[in-house]
Structure formats: C-alpha cells, structure tokens
Image (cartoon, grey):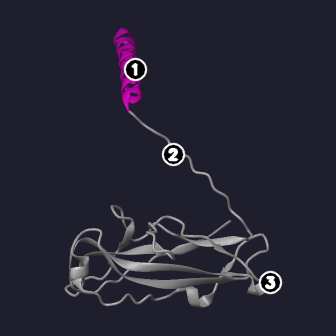
Amino acid sequence: MKKKVVSFAAAALLGFVAAQSAFAEFAQSIDQGKVNFKGELTTNTCTIDADSKDQIVQLPRVSTSALAARGNVAGSTSFEIKVSKCAAEVNKVAAHFEMENVDPDTLTLKNEAAGDGAATNVSVQLVNSDGTALPVGSTGRFFDVSGTEDARGATMIYGGQYYALDKTTAGKVESHALFTLAYE
C-alpha cells in the first residue's frame, strides 16, 4: 500500500511538471504587449465656476438629411467652461473629457434618449474651439490662465455637434460628458 501511494505521488508530480512545461511553452508563444501608465497629481489647481459645472447645451434642430451617412456632422454648438481661483503655478488649463457614455467605435457620446421618440444612429461629437474633433477620453485644447488672486482664471471654449453613426432617423438626442481639469 505504501508503495502505491509513493508511486501515485511520483506520477502526480511528473504530471504537474509536464503541465507546467507545456503551459510555459504556450505562454511564450502568445504575442503580448504592455501598457505603462505615468502621470502626476498636483495640489495647484483651479476652481470650476458654478455656472460651468452642470450645463445644458442646446443643439439646434437639424434635418436627418444632413446626417444621412456615417461620419456626417451637423449642428455645431459652442459652450464655455470657466475657471477661477487658479494657483499662481498654473499657466494653462484644459478640460479632459472622461471615458463615460462613449461609443467605442467613434469615441463620441452615445445618445441616451430612449423609447419611441429617440433618434437613432446618432451620437454627439465633442470639438475643440477650432472645430477639430475631440475624442471622448482625451484632453481638449489648453487655454492660458491670466489675472490675479481669485480672478486668476480662464474661459475654455469647446463644442458639441451631431455625429451620424449611419443614416439617422428623426427623434430626440440627449447625452452627457463628464470632465475634469488638466493643467500645464
């Protein structure tokens, strides 16, 4: 009986070693990469003005014919984000639009309107003040900070516009974007 237990233990050990060897060969044959993250946190910041924290940007009513094919845009509308009380060390500030409510294929904001009255095949694209696309998950154009003490701040200008994911249908469009501040 003792001999059978030792033989079984030896066989199990050999099986384990063989499995580890096979796994190591398999793991080495997988093509893989690595993503490193680096950043910096600061206590030198600005304060978002109250009227800039929770805004409603009213996009214009546009025809679905302007949004008839994927990539068509229409209804560009600007909005401002104002900051004040910026630390003396802050020279530039920008909005960083967080990866929430994002269409992963276009990096635009999903239409959150629901039900029978919702438009289809449309999202909202963020843009910089010069009209260039601003993918969700990225930092917008930086703006100079000026002034002194509590009045030290900036007014950042960005925009939103309809973005066709395919031929659109008429209806409501509602979306949102969360942002934080980025500094230079």
Dominant secondary structure, magenta? helix
Badge 3 local density, few (<14 within 10 Å), some, or many (20+)?
few
Residue 160 drawn at (x, y percent): 42, 79
Q: Which residue is mark 3?
A: 149
What is the CA distance from the residue labelled 1 to the residue labelled 3? 65 Å
Q: Is residue 19 left or right of residue 142?
A: left
Using the image as rendered, state which of residue 33 and residue 70 is in the foreground: 70
- Rendered image quadrant of residue 119: bottom left
Q: Which residue is mark 2?
A: 35
What is the CA distance from the residue labelled 1 to the residue labelled 2? 27 Å
What's the mark number on residue 132? Answer: none
Magenta highlight on residue 27: yes
SS at badge 1: helix
Q: Is residue 88 left or right of residue 122?
A: right
Q: Residue at x 50, y 88 (%)?
A: 55
Report the mark closest to the observer, 1 or 3.
Answer: 3
Q: Quadrant of the C terminus?
A: bottom right
Amino acid at the residue labelled 3: Glu
Q: Is residue 15 above or below residue 178?
A: above
What is the CA distance from the residue labelled 3 to the residue labelled 2? 40 Å
Amino acid at the residue labelled 1: Ser
Residue 102 drawn at (x, y percent): 39, 68
SS at badge 2: loop
What's the mark number on residue 21? Answer: 1
Q: Are marks 3 and 2 in contact (CB under 8 Å)?
A: no
